[in-house]
């Protein structure tokens, strides 16, 4: 089982709400879905980052767990572990 870690998607403030982040994430998810060995994509989001959480949920990411004191130098230090799982059952049956 392979997993893909999405470290950072950053878009400068003047370019937010222009579809740049969506295009970047869609490109990553498309490539990950084609790589049949990748069963899930995961990332960390600071618990106070409601916009990021909402953004990723639009792409079917779910909160798997909340990790206390994940970040060392930012407040709040807690994060959500978000995961998007690909259904590979039909590929295995073929």
Image (spheres, helix red, strand yellow):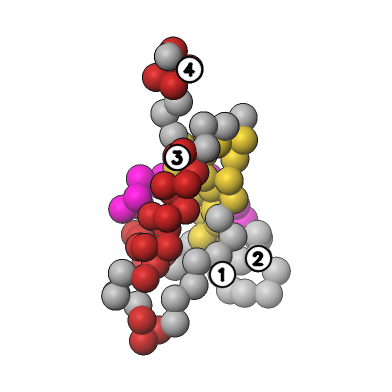
- Residue 49: x percent and y percent? 44, 67
Spatial CA span between label 1 and label 4: 42 Å
Which portion, as a residue range, is magenta? 58-68
- Residues at badges 2 and 1 in contact (C-beta under 8 Å)? yes
Disc 1 or disc 3, which is closer to the eye? 3
Q: Which mark is residue 92?
A: 4
Residue drawn at 44 percent across, 48 percent down: 29
If you read the primary sequence from the N terminus, does the residue marked by circle 2 or circle 1 appear first? 2
If you read the primary sequence from the N terminus, does the residue marked by circle 1 or circle 4 appear first? 1
Q: Is residue 28 above or below residue 90?
A: below
Q: Which mark is residue 76?
A: 1
Q: Residue extending furthest bottom?
A: 14
Quadrant where the N terminus sits is top right
Reading the image, the residue beneath label 2 is: 71
Q: Which mark is residue 51?
A: none
Disc 2 or disc 1, which is closer to the eye? 2
Reading the image, the residue beneath label 3 is: 33
């Amino acid at each position: 089982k392979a997993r893909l870690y999405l470290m950072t998607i950053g878009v400068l403030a003047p370019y937010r709400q222009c579809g740049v982040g969506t295009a970047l994430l869609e490109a990553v998810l498309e490539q990950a879905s084609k790589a049949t060995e990748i069963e899930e994509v995961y990332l960390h989001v600071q618990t106070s980052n409601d916009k990021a959480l909402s953004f990723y949920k639009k792409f079917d990411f779910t909160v798997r767990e909340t990790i206390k004191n994940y970040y060392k130098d930012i407040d709040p230090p807690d994060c959500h572990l978000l995961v998007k799982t690909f259904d590979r059952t039909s590929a295995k049956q073929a």
